[in-house]
Amino acid sequence: MTAALDLAAFEGHTPGPWHTSDTRTAIHYVKADLTYIATVSSLLDGKKNAERLIEESRNAALLAAAPALLAECRTLRARVAELEAEGARLREALMDAAAFIALAADRGVLNGEEVSGMIEDYQAALGAKPL
């Protein structure tokens, strides 16, 4: 598995939005207002053709999307952290419920068959190992 990208390494980049220059040439510029960010070209490889021009245009578009992609990545990472915390909270609540059911069974409030079924349901919901 690839290591997580260190998003802090991108702090201080030129703010977006970035855009590409609308050229029909072999050179594409990625800019933010009047600031040039990058030049995309493969003039030195000698392989100019329609496919190459399309590829260069798409590469420039990908570079121009970098600030938006970075923002989306940050948003998604924050959401994943929220969901992980919520999952931990729900697992704890389900484990508490399973312990309560077991206690109720020990005190004779529920019969053994009901308790076994409930505990198995909670464990399945948690993906947990049997108690």
Image (cartoon, grey):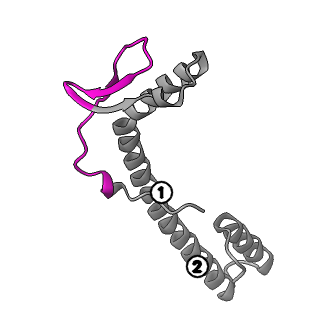
In the image, residue 70 above or below residue 82: above
Q: Residue at (45%, 32%) from the top-left corner?
A: 62
Circle 2 residue: 100
Circle 1 residue: 83
Question: Looking at the rendering, in which quadrant would you find the N terminus?
Answer: bottom right
Q: CA distance from mark 1 to mark 2?
A: 25 Å
Magenta-highlighted residues = 8-36
Q: Residues within 10 Å of mark 2 (few under 14, many from 20)?
A: few
Mark 1 and mark 2 lie on one chain; the one further toward the N terminus is 1
Q: Residues within 10 Å of mark 1 (few under 14, many from 20)?
A: few
Q: Position of residue 10 (x, y in %)?
A: 31, 51
- Residue 53 relative to residue 23: left or right: right
Q: Secondary structure at mark 2?
A: helix
Q: Position of residue 126 (x, y in %)?
A: 64, 67
In the image shown, does 66 or 43 lie closer to the viewer?
43
In the image shown, does 116 or 56 lie closer to the viewer?
56
In the image, residue 78 above or below residue 56: below
